[in-house]
């Protein structure tokens, strides 16, 4: 990967997600988003086991947050939205491990853990 893995992941996801969704490739605090937010948080870098020198596992937490303040509306919407996101990851062949319901500030969200492999070019 020549570009930063966060940006590569954002570009891969962009055509597979609804146009109204906002992909944020940085860990930031958003006050009151008007749409679904998919935030990409790079969490760790590890040497890829049993791989040649220069291969790294890049760990991410991808958070999908609802813009709804009403938790019932947020939960109903997130049920479908998290499935849309994990099916997009599956379609890209990206290994994700869990999707866990969390609070993102005061908004209902899911944290999805995944790993990309980066190789020196």
Image (tube, rainbow, N blue to C red):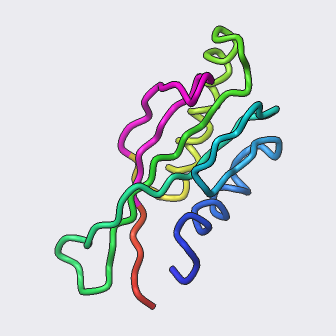
Judge left or right: residue 114 versus residue 72. left
Q: Could you say where residue 115 lies in the image, as x and y percent from the top left?
A: 39, 58
User: What residue do we see at 71% from left, 16% from top?
Assistant: 69
How many marks overall? 0
Q: Could you say where residue 51 lies in the image, as x and y percent from the top left?
A: 23, 79
Magenta stretch: residue 62 in it? no
Judge left or right: residue 118 versus residue 17. left
Vertical arrangement, residue 80 with respect to residue 17, above or below: above
* Magenta highlight: main SS: strand
Judge left or right: residue 13 versus residue 112. right
Q: Could you say where residue 101 lies in the image, as x and y percent from the top left?
A: 47, 25
For this orientation, the residue located farthest to the left is 50
Vertical arrangement, residue 82 with respect to residue 87, above or below: above
The C terminus lies in quadrant? bottom left
User: What residue do we see at 36% from left, 43% from top?
Assistant: 97
Vertical arrangement, residue 52 with respect to residue 47, above or below: below
Q: Which residues are magenta?
A: 97-115
User: What residue do we see at 51% from left, 52% from top?
Assistant: 41
User: What residue do we see at 63% from left, 26% from top?
Assistant: 80
Vertical arrangement, residue 92 with respect to residue 107, above or below: below
Observer-nearest of 106 and 84:
106
Magenta stretch: residue 110 in it? yes
Q: Could you say where residue 43 lies in the image, as x and y percent from the top left?
A: 41, 55
């Amino acid at each position: 990967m020549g570009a930063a893995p966060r940006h590569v992941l954002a570009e891969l996801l962009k055509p597979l997600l609804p146009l109204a969704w906002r992909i944020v490739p940085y860990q930031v605090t958003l006050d009151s988003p008007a749409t679904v937010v998919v935030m990409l948080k790079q969490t760790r870098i590890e040497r890829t086991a049993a791989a040649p020198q220069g291969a790294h596992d890049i760990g991410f937490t991808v958070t999908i947050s609802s813009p709804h303040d009403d938790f019932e509306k947020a939960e109903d919407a997130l049920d479908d939205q998290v499935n849309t996101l994990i099916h997009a990851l599956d379609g890209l062949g990206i290994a994700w491990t869990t999707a866990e319901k969390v609070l993102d500030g005061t908004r209902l969200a899911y944290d999805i853990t995944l790993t990309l492999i980066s190789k020196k070019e």
